[in-house]
Image (tube, rainbow, N blue to C red):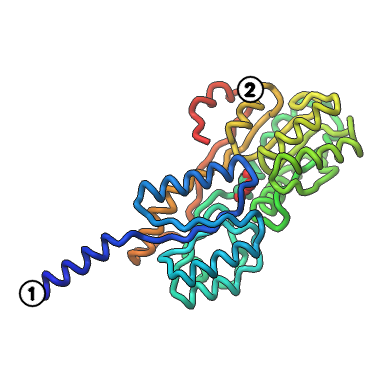
Amino acid sequence: GFAAAAGHTSLALADKPLTIGFSQVGAESEWRTANTVSIKDAAKQAGVNLKFADAQQKQENQVKAIRSFIAQKVDVIAFSPVVESGWDTVLREAKAAKIPVILTDRAVNVSDKSLYVTFIGSDFVEEGRRAARWLLERAKTLPAGDINIVELQGTVGSAPAIDRKSGFEQEIKANPNLKIIRSQTGDFTRAKGKEVMEAFLKADGKKINVLYAHNDDMAIGAIQAIEEAGLKPGKDILVISIDGVKGAFEAMMAGKLNVTVECSPLLGPQLMSIARDVKAGKPVPKRITTEEGVFPAEVAAKEFPNRKY
Ligand code: AHR
């Protein structure tokens, strides 16, 4: 009868695997690799058919990937936007095709917020503030006078670079001795972090008291540059970074990194469950903020065994 047929239809629908097209930033850092693993593993666990595209840190590749997901009529598009701006057109195309978009990790800057359903990720401004607060505390134990900071920024135009810079700047104002004397992008990579730190050291050498790196990978690259310049990272130059990857914990245990502010890449399981809800037409919050901590070197050895990325 009708009821049986209807029941059968809904069962068939429930059985159809959800297809998600995911456009990833790239493979620029230890964090990003962990994020990719989290998303792929969670998709497998949830029985989601995942179409994964790596944009190699280029927005044009992400736009292409999103257009191809639209053409393939995926159920949900998810992506971590390499930069904040320039998404209006392609997101309007997704909306016209009635494909919901979920942002993970990084935000977009669009005037029409209905162009995405939700944004799952960290509060990058708060991460910058936390990094600064650690330094404000530490500064109380340092000799009086200027404390010269060099900053390694993330990818130009990316949400984490913009927000981590502004959060840090807001907070260090509380101590007029804290001065950012140089600030340049290291594109979130070890190689660039090392290269730019070499230039900073050449220009300012012993004047530098603190390095603030927008991620652990750049800090790890810079640590090498500091050592090659004959200085002691973690002592002659305090090193502060963000992410909390295993490499950062190892550097802290070796006394070369002073603190890492956590930014969790383990967004996969949450993405899968939110995508399911979105597909089922359930309401979801517009912003889902990841909860995270701050790990100074003093707790690194104790925390290391608990780290998952
Ligand atoms: O968007 C998150 C940032 O991107 C991470 O802090 C960084 O390591 C990654 O490349």
Task: Kindly report the distance in space between the C-alpha atoms of the residues bearing marks 2 and 1.
Answer: 69 Å
39 up-or-down from 88: above or below: above
Please identify the quarter of the rendering in which residue 145 is found.
Answer: top right
Residue 237 visible in the displayed image: yes
Circle 2 or circle 1, nearest the eye:
1
How many numbered marks are there? 2
From the image, tell me which residue sits under label 1: 1
Label at residue 55 = none
Percent x, y for residue 95?
49, 74
Residue pointed to by mark 2 = 253
Q: Secondary structure at mark 2?
A: helix
Q: Quadrant of residue 150?
A: top right
Question: Which residue is more in the foreground, 273 or 189?
Answer: 189
Which one is in front, 147 or 31? 31
**Disc 2: CA contacts within 10 A as few (<14), some (14-19) or many (>=20):** some
Q: Is residue 44 left or right of residue 106?
A: left
Label 1 crowding class (10 Å Cα cut-off): few <14, some 14-19, many 20+? few
The x, y position of residue 215, in whole percent, is 67, 41
- Camera-side residue: 182 or 54? 54
Q: Amino acid at mark 2?
A: Met
Q: Earlier in the sequence, mark 2 or mark 1?
A: 1
Mark 1 belongs to which amino acid? Gly
